[in-house]
Amino acid sequence: MKVSDKEFWGELRRNKALYSRTARALEKKYDITYTRQSVKERAEKDIDQLNDIVEENLDVAEEIHHKLMLSEDEKIQIKATQFYLKNKGKGRGYVEKQQIEINEPKPFTWFDDEN
């Protein structure tokens, strides 16, 4: 039995573009063998539709993240806000940098002219 495009894309959307989960759902629903790789290959033939599902998932994740930023639990609110600023606030200077200190008097000996 061949799974129609409408059925395939509906199942992929219901399973949030997770290939293995979609393959299992198709196998169960249509009593056929469908592999993760088959789902991946078929999905990647229509990148626009696949990207639309991924974007929808990102919308859901961002909505949940914004709810966490408004949480009444202050620790959750702070962590969610820090994560947001670190990832979305770079243009406003919210950049996490790492500072490394070297306490040796002359650490870079390979630059010395010993010849």
Image (spheres, grey):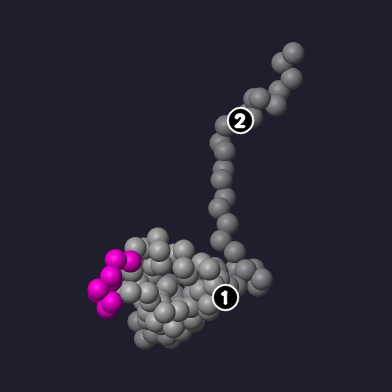
Q: Quadrant of residue 112?
A: top right
Task: Count all numbered tags in the image, as a single digit.
Answer: 2
Q: Residue furthest top?
A: 115
Instruction: Point out the stretch of residues depicted in magenta.
Output: 27-34
Residue 97 placement (x, y as % from top left): 58, 57
Residue 29 placement (x, y as % from top left): 27, 78
Q: Is residue 51 visible?
A: no
Residue at 25% across, 73% down? 31
Q: Nearer the viewer, residue 104 or 47?
A: 47
Amino acid on which disc 1 is placed:
Asp
Q: Which residue is mark 1?
A: 48
Compared to 103, does 55 lie above or below?
A: below
Q: Which residue is mark 2?
A: 107
Amino acid on which disc 2 is placed:
Pro
Residue at 42% across, 73% down? 17
Q: Nearer the viewer, mark 1 or mark 2?
A: 1
Residue 114 placement (x, y as % from top left): 72, 16
Residue 46 placement (x, y as % from top left): 54, 72
Label 1 residue SS: helix
The stretch drawn in magenta includes residue 13: no
The stretch drawn in magenta includes residue 30: yes
Q: Is residue 26 left or right of residue 96?
A: left
Q: Residues within 10 Å of mark 2 (few under 14, many from 20)?
A: few
Q: Quadrant of residue 106?
A: top right
- Residue 77 disc label: none
Q: Quadrant of the C terminus?
A: top right
Q: Nearer the viewer, residue 101 or 68?
A: 68
Tag 2 or tag 1, which sits nearer the N-term? 1
How much space separates mark 1 and mark 2, taking CA atoms? 52 Å
